[in-house]
Image: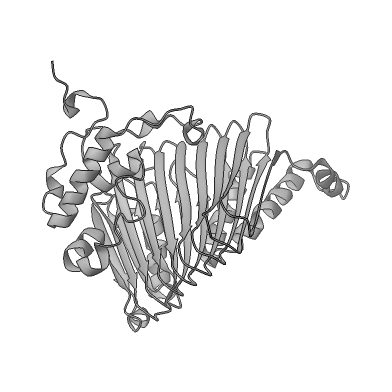
């Protein structure tokens, strides 16, 4: 008896008919990715990157296509549209379950001519910008579930910032999940050309609060020489959803990137965020904020890979947990051979507000040369009793004192974000703290 892909649970037997109209180079990429996904084994749970999450959760499952909500039913879009109208955004893009899109570019931004369009449209109309970059960082060989995304992404967003363009206002991307229970596969490609600068807000949320949405999203950021990318990723899916997220940046000579990601939602969320510092004199700053409650489970992996001399990287990853929430964090700094005069720092701090909360921290250094400065540190524990005593001794009730200390813990990360995001996340933190 012979076994086919159709007979093995989780295998991808064929590509959906809707993906058969791609250009030849993209169709070939999808076929290669499908083969890579089917051929690769399920990650082993004894490997530290999968020790705390069951990889079987993210296997492909046949079913109906994702369902998109009406734009009028998405409050986040209405709010963002108001900001666009008053000139606070350079561009606005709504990705509705990877099925429908609405994209707007401000006239003021048009002077710098950014390209903002759907990724499939860009693959057809602008292959000169897309083909060499799509999958260059997160391709078929990156990992099993990244290969699945490369094979099945139905659509996504493409952004190109031309040489020398510096956008004064952010580009806001809104990612509404499916209102059904089917997997959605979204993909984003952002290319910042030489001497350009852009701020991107990438916001993921559930269209339907009651549906157990499932999403597999990949983001690739290309920073060419002397570019400067500010990228803010917010994940606030509903507490029934399952989320898999991979993001990679590459920096060429003298390029900079600041990445801030806030993980607030989902029942279970696994993320892999990293920067490849390919050129000389690059700079990468990463900041993470996780706030979990109930039985939420978060599994984050961050990486800085230094491949060019005189690079600087710094990572500050903060976690706040209450109830029976669980966070696992693994952070890697890698400095390749003959890459001298690099500085790299990594910090992971975990604040546990209740006895049932649990955090794991696994910092890693992989230094293959000698003239570098690299440090890392991690802490896991409850709120400092002396700080709590200090506030309570001045007449502040214990619950309120705890809230003050938690707000102070997360405030440095929030202060890095655009004003509109700061208010939104502060409200979210306050809501989680109400039941302390």
Which quadrant: the N terminus? top left
Residue 165, image x and y in percent? 39, 80
Residue at the right extreme of this rendering? 393
Q: Can residue 433 be seen?
A: yes
| Number of callouts | 0
Pick out the residue farthest to the top.
1
Is 256 left, or right, of 140 in this rendering?
A: right
Task: Please tell me which residue is depicted at 49% across the width and 27% down the height of the picture.
Answer: 46
Residue 266 shows in this picture: no
Is 23 displayed left or right of 212 in the figure?
left
Q: Identify the colour scheme used.
A: one colour
Q: Residue at x 63, y 43 (%)?
A: 320
Q: Is residue 236 left or right of residue 135?
A: right
Residue 369 at x, y percent in the picture? 58, 54
**Which corner quadrant of the image does residue 380 belong to?**
top right
Identify which residue is drawn at 86% across, 48% down. 390
Please tell me which residue lies in front, 106 or 7: 7
Image coordinates of residue 163 in percent, x first then y, are 36, 79
* The one of 277 and 91 positioned closer to us in this rendering: 277
- For the residue pair 254 and 354, the one nearer the viewer reads as 254
């Amino acid at each position: 008896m012979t076994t086919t892909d159709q007979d093995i649970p989780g295998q991808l037997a064929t590509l959906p008919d809707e993906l058969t109209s791609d250009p030849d180079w993209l169709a070939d990429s999808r076929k290669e990715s499908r083969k890579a996904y089917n051929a690769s084994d399920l990650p082993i749970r004894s490997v530290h990157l999968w020790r705390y999450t069951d990889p079987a959760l993210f296997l492909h499952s046949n079913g109906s296509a994702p369902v998109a909500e009406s734009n009028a039913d998405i409050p986040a879009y209405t709010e963002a549209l108001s900001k666009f109208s008053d000139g606070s955004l350079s561009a606005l893009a709504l990705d509705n379950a990877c099925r429908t899109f609405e994209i707007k570019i401000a006239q003021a931004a048009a002077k710098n001519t950014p390209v903002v369009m759907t990724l499939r449209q860009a693959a057809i109309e602008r292959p000169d910008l897309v083909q060499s970059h799509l999958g260059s960082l997160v391709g078929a060989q990156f990992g099993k579930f990244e290969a699945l995304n490369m094979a099945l992404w139905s659509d996504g967003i493409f952004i190109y910032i031309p040489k020398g363009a510096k956008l004064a206002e952010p580009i806001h991307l809104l990612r509404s999940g499916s209102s059904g229970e089917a997997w959605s596969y979204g993909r984003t490609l952002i290319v910042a050309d030489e001497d350009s600068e852009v701020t991107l807000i990438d916001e993921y949320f559930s269209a339907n609060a009651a549906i157990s949405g499932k999403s597999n999203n990949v983001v690739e950021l290309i920073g060419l020489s002397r570019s400067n990318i500010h990228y803010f990723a917010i994940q606030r899916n509903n507490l029934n959803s399952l989320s898999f997220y991979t993001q990679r940046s590459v920096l060429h000579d003298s390029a900079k990137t600041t990445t801030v990601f806030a993980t607030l939602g989902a029942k279970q969320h696994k993320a892999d965020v990293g920067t490849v510092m390919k050129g000389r004199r690059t700079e990468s700053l990463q900041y993470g904020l996780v706030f979990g409650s109930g039985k939420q489970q978060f599994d984050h992996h961050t990486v800085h890979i230094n491949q060019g001399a005189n690079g600087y990287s710094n990572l500050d990853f903060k976690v706040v947990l209450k109830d029976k929430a669980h966070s696992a964090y693994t952070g890697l700094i890698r400095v390749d051979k003959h890459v001298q005069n690099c500085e790299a720092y990594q910090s992971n701090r975990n604040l546990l507000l209740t006895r049932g909360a649990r955090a794991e921290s696994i910092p890693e250094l992989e230094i293959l040369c000698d003239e570098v400065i690299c440090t890392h540190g991690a802490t896991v524990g409850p709120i400092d009793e002396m700080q709590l005593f200090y506030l309570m001794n001045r007449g502040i009730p214990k619950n309120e004192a705890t809230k003050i200390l938690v707000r102070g813990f997360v405030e440095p990360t929030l202060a890095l974000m655009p004003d509109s995001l700061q208010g939104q996340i502060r409200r979210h933190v306050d809501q989680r703290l109400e039941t302390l």
